[in-house]
Amino acid sequence: MRKIFATVALLAAAGGALSGCSVSAGADDGKETVVVGYQSKTINTVTAGTLLRGLGYFEKRLGGKYQVEWQDYDTGAPITAKMVAGKIDIGSMGDYPLLINASRTQGVPAAQTRLVSVTGYNLRGGLNSVVVAPSSKARTLADLKGAKVSASSGSAGHGTLVQALERAGLDPSTDVEVVNQQPPVGASALQSGNVQGYAQFVAWPGLLVFKNQARLVYDGSALDVPTFHGVVVREAYAKERPDVLQAFLQAQIDATRYLHEHPVEAAEAVAKATGLPPEVVYLYNGRDGIATFDVTLKSRLLAALDHDQKYLKSIGTDFKGVDVAKFADDSYLRKAYGASYDADAAGSVNAARISGTDAACGTTAGDPAKAGELWLTGEDTLRPAATPTCLLRQIAAATSGGGSVRAAYVPDAATGTHWFADKSVWVRDPAAEGNERFKPFTTRDGAEAFVKEHPRAALVGYDEALKAAAGGASR
């Protein structure tokens, strides 16, 4: 864990031998090249990465004046290293890597960076989670005491793990052994049993759970600390090529609007480009998904970024404090965004909302704390559900008629985090109104906390809840 910055420095030193210098001419047409670093599988950054690239909006905004080189990485560390070396002009990464980026570049005038926009966020921290093997006996994070937990050092997932362990009364430096691994390596290590826990950022936990290769043991939303991903630019480049940065930000706004208006198509496009299942992409990026996509630099997000600094200092001795107010610069975005910037920056409503009439309960779906969606095989649109109980009824009706479920999404009854219905922990509360009798939770820990406060409530299996809802036992 103490090698975060040493690794970044080593990569930066090697950067001089890498191709892609932004000030050089393109190899084939003599155009100057702008280099964008992104993380294709970190799907909270798609509006500045995978989706943006696929839509071609940046190139269109540039009007053919520049050549764009897209460089894909698993984490933010190599993007930062190449920005220090002047080899990447614009990059996107999570909140902890953003702080490392600012810290590493602030002492190098030519490499100093500025945070210029946000891609997506979750105000409770739900973009980061900890999972265990399906057969693990761990039911809470505290059960991982003495275990090995895979995490990418200095990542948002690692930061969440450190804060969550402290909340659970554990010492992150002594009570667990954090194994520094890239997300794909850590996923393999969890399956092989070489580690007992896996702390990562979107979309890795959801992917493993969807594939029945892991079980959620800690929902980052329980931390109730905002987390986000954002876009950084080398300040010198922004001043030298303001037209390029404006084009990028305008294109990101275009891509964000597209995602809001076409969430299913966007999920399918990202899935095709990354190899991720579209059902997993939609969990995070769909209507009322775990991620809210909004480019504005919100005060709550910046305050959370400042709050995260003490945790980075605890896991990296070379981390130097960052003046977040100076690092964050929305002047470029304001110009690209327009007159509604302040109003939108003050809000936090997800522009991609679940809406419509629930076919099973005959009521309107619209409350984000209760609404879910059903994605049936062979259908291009998702069916809205007003409550989790209503969703169970829809699933039962569809499957009894020969249909099959691609995915069903429900919000955690306590945190609001969307999760797969069949992977959730269900509680039957006979004291609740009929259409709200069954309540889902992302973790067993969360479900048991609810039962403790509601004496008549009890845990039930998913199949049992499905059968009871279908038979009207919930009424």
Image (cartoon, helix red, strand yellow):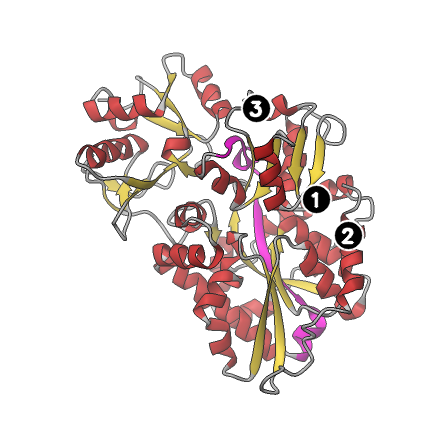
Q: In 3D space, how far apart are the residues under numbered discs 2 and 1 (Cα atoms)?
A: 10 Å
Residue 395 lies, with reference to residue 78, above or below; the image says: above
Q: Which residue is located at x 63 percent, y 50 percent?
A: 95
The label shown at residue 140 is: 3
Q: Are marks 2 and 1 in contact (CB under 8 Å)?
A: yes
Specify the quadrant of the image occupied by residue 168: top right
Residue 440 is situated, as x and y percent measured from the top left of the image, at 39, 29
Q: Are marks 2 and 3 in contact (CB under 8 Å)?
A: no
Q: How many marks?
A: 3
> How many C-alpha atoms fall within 10 Å of the one at disc 1: few (<14), some, or many (≥20)?
many
The label shown at residue 46 is: none
Is residue 283 in the magenta section? no
Q: Which residue is located at x 28 percent, y 26 percent?
A: 466
Q: Is residue 417 visible?
A: no
- Which residue position holds label 1? 153
> How many C-alpha atoms fall within 10 Å of the one at disc 2: few (<14), some, or many (≥20)?
some
Q: Nearer the viewer, residue 403 or 423?
A: 403
Is residue 217 in the magenta section? yes
Q: Please provide the residue range marked out in magenta.
A: 213-240
Q: Is residue 125 left or right of residue 355?
A: right
Residue 222 is situated, as x and y percent measured from the top left of the image, at 54, 33
Amino acid type assigned to the residue bearing label 2 in the image: Thr
Disc with the residue nearer the chain's start (3 vs 1): 3
Amino acid type assigned to the residue bearing label 3 in the image: Thr
Q: Nearer the viewer, residue 339 or 214?
A: 214
Q: In 3D space, how far apart are the residues under numbered discs 3 and 1 (Cα atoms)?
A: 22 Å
- Which residue position holds label 2? 7
Disc with the residue nearer the chain's start (2 vs 1): 2
- Please tell me whether mark 3 sits on a helix, a strand or a loop: loop
